[in-house]
Image (spheres, rainbow, N blue to C red):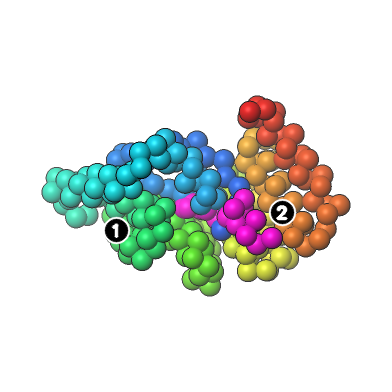
């Protein structure tokens, strides 16, 4: 069951991910866009597919993309200096690539640099800092380093609440990420409470007919299924399926 859940539910999380089933609108990493597993989804697996699928066609994708991102990083450093948002974005994109390659030590080093620079350039209370905290937490979650991931998830959640307020879709995603961490640790009561909060908040901020609501329904169903509470899981799965068909179409 744990293997099955890791594929479906991951917490970004990103960056992402671990986190739950993802609904991501991103298609690829660009130099102008920060690689953010947090902003776009909860699942590492689905985040990877959504962001990188168009680039998987070439067998040598990773090598070529790494070379390109390193080149862009060096160009930005020469152009702007070491402490500039474009440099931070380049570092973050490269870290995201290493994460997808499974080069966790390299990714961790870069994500830490991104966090330090984001705090220095933007200050402690900025959404990009929350994103960086979340990305680092997602990296740790993917490695099963849950005790290290938890404080970063909590910091990201606290910061988003402070900046965005209690009722914002990103807060719901952070709740979901933390819930998925607890789920993977077997802390089911804590996970259930946060999954329910995420579901209620998603419905309130996004409306009933939104893919994130289907994601939250599915997450809660997965938790109930793992606990053997099948009669409670079934209606949630059905609701998620109906909603996805309605919002995304049959195919």
As displayed, is residue 165 above or below residue 204? Answer: below
Q: Work out how far the residue at label 1 is from the one at label 2, CA to CA, in angstroms.
A: 37 Å
Could you say whether the residue bearing mark 2 is in a helix, strand or loop?
A: helix
Membership of 232 in magenta stretch: no
- Residue 193 appears left or right of 103: right
Pick out the residue farthest to the left: 78
Q: Write down the residue under mark 1.
A: 117
- Residue 205 appears left or right of 109: right
Q: Is residue 227 visible?
A: yes
- Nearest the viewer among 32 and 154 is 32
**What's drawn in magenta, residue-wise?**
1-17
Residue for point 79% across, 51% down: 233
Q: Residues within 10 Å of mark 2 (few under 14, many from 20)?
A: many
Could you say where residue 227 lies in the image, as x and y percent from the top left?
A: 78, 62
Could you say where residue 223 lies in the image, as x and y percent from the top left?
A: 72, 57
Quadrant in which the N terminus appears: bottom right
Residue 106, disc: none
Q: Which quadrant of the view contains residue 117? A: bottom left
Q: Write down the residue under mark 2.
A: 222
- Nearest the viewer among 37 and 59 is 59
Q: How crowded is mark 1: few (under 14 residues within 10 Å), some or many (20 or more)?
A: many
Residue for point 77% across, 56% down: 225
Pick out the residue farthest to the bottom: 147
- Residue 182 appears left or right of 228: left
Q: Which of marks 1 and 2 is nearer the N terminus?
A: 1
């Amino acid at each position: 069951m744990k293997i099955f859940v890791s594929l479906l539910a991951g917490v970004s999380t990103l960056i992402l991910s671990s986190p739950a089933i993802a609904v991501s609108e991103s298609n690829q990493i660009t130099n102008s866009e920060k690689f953010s597993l947090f902003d776009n989804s909860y699942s590492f697996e689905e985040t990877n597919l959504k962001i990188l699928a168009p680039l998987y066609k070439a067998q040598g994708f990773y090598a070529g993309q790494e070379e390109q991102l390193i080149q862009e990083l060096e160009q930005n450093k020469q152009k702007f200096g070491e402490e500039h948002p474009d440099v931070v974005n380049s570092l973050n994109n490269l870290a995201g690539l290493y994460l997808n390659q499974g080069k966790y030590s390299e990714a961790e080093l870069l994500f830490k640099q991104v966090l330090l620079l984001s705090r220095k350039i933007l200050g402690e209370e900025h959404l990009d800092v929350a994103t960086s905290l979340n990305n680092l937490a997602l990296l740790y979650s993917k490695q099963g380093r849950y005790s290290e991931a938890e404080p970063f998830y909590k910091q990201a959640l606290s910061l988003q609440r402070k900046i965005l307020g209690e009722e914002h879709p990103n807060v719901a995603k952070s709740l979901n990420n933390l819930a998925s961490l607890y789920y993977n640790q077997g802390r089911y009561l804590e996970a259930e409470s946060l999954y329910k909060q995420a579901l209620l908040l998603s419905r309130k901020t996004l409306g009933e007919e939104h893919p994130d609501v289907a994601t939250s329904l599915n997450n809660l169903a997965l938790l109930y299924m793992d606990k053997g509470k099948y009669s409670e899981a079934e209606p949630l799965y059905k609701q998620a399926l109906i909603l996805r068909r309605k919002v995304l179409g049959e195919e």
